[in-house]
């Protein structure tokens, strides 16, 4: 197949490389001319503008958008839609809130354009092992794009999970679970780091990868991290979030579904970004005030 591809960041570049390995024709555009040139070296067709990219595609055209979520994606979808023709398809492979997918699909339908949301998991390892793809949208464009999904995913690694927004909804929940799993590992390893047994944490992590019920790819990544930096001295405990955890909590509130593990994991990330917590200063002040407990000035 052929498709246009917008966004050649860490994931985007690996995705077009994987597509080219399976001989798909990929016309690429990115604001960085250097990244476009790098993709051209992988066998992609270069374009210096959105209009040029679309002009190099045969109808019915497919354009895959892989740019940061929020305004960059919204602006790109609008710009691409203005250049496409009835019967063409836009695929959003970024981290978009599913409500936006539903709105966009309805707007694009008025122009007789198809919209597919592709929740994409795999990170920088996707080039080697493939991407797990959670696809939302109408049957016809999804079926037409099956060869692309099959190339990007490992065996049994993609599924059409429902209508518009379903792909990003499933990806949102996936990321919420991911937050919770990582928090569980983080807390367990912190406790072991303070053990009187002087544990080799890398060895323990590797041990758990062999037959343990807590083995996972995340734990495998922990093995690698601890091998390189056994006490994680090279890192600061500053953890960002990409938005899906917040969206999942909001959705859970709407549905009266308790998600305490995810909520704790997300709030712990918030705390990691504070050099000094006002709340903890208040705790210290109150303990000192009512009980004369010592404080540090």
Image (spheres, rainbow, N blue to C red):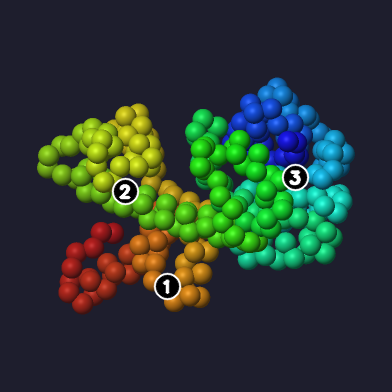
The tag earlier along the polypeptide, 2 or 1, is 2
* Quadrant containing the N terminus in the rendered view: top right
User: Vertical placement of 193 versus 167: above or below?
Assistant: above
Check whether the beta carbons of the residues at disc 2 and disc 1 lie within 8 A of each other: no
Task: Name the foreground residue: 183 vs 211.
Answer: 211
Residue under pointer 3: 63
The residue sitting at 76% across, 45% down in the picture is 62
Task: Name the foreground residue: 103 vs 68.
Answer: 103
Check whether the beta carbons of the residues at disc 1 and disc 3 lie within 8 A of each other: no
Residue under pointer 2: 186
- Of circles 2 and 3, the one toward us is 3
Alpha carbon distance from label 1 to label 3: 36 Å
The tag earlier along the polypeptide, 2 or 3, is 3
Residue under pointer 1: 257
The residue sitting at 80% across, 50% down in the picture is 88
Mark 3: which secondary structure?
strand
Alpha carbon distance from label 2 to label 3: 39 Å
Residue 106 at x, y = what percent?
Answer: 75, 65
């Amino acid at each position: 197949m052929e498709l246009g591809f917008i966004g050649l960041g860490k994931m985007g570049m690996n995705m077009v490389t994987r597509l080219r390995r399976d001989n798909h024709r990929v016309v690429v555009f990115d604001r960085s001319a250097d990244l476009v040139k790098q993709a051209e070296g992988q066998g992609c067709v270069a374009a210096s503008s959105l209009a040029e990219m679309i002009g190099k595609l045969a109808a019915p055209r497919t354009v895959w958008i892989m740019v940061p979520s929020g305004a960059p994606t919204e602006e790109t979808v609008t710009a691409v839609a203005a250049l496409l023709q009835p019967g063409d398809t836009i695929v959003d492979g970024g981290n978009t809130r599913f409500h936006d997918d539903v709105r966009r699909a309805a707007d694009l339908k008025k122009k007789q354009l198809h919209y597919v949301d592709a929740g994409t998991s795999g990170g920088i390892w996707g080039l080697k092992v493939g991407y797990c793809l959670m696809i939302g949208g109408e049957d016809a464009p999804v079926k037409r794009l099956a060869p692309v999904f099959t190339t990007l995913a490992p065996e049994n690694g993609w599924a059409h999970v429902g209508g518009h927004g379903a792909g990003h909804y499933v990806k949102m929940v996936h990321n919420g679970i991911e937050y919770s799993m990582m928090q569980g590992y983080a807390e367990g390893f912190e406790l072991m780091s303070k053990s009187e047994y002087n544990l080799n944490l890398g060895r323990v992590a590797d041990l758990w990868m062999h037959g343990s019920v807590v083995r996972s790819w995340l734990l495998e990544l922990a093995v690698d991290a601890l091998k390189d930096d056994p006490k994680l001295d090279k890192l600061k405990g500053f953890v960002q979030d990409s938005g899906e955890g917040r969206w999942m909590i909001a959705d859970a509130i709407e549905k009266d579904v308790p998600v305490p593990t995810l909520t704790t994991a997300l709030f712990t990330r918030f705390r990691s970004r504070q050099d000094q917590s006002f709340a903890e200063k208040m705790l210290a002040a109150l303990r000192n005030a009512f009980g004369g407990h010592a404080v540090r000035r």
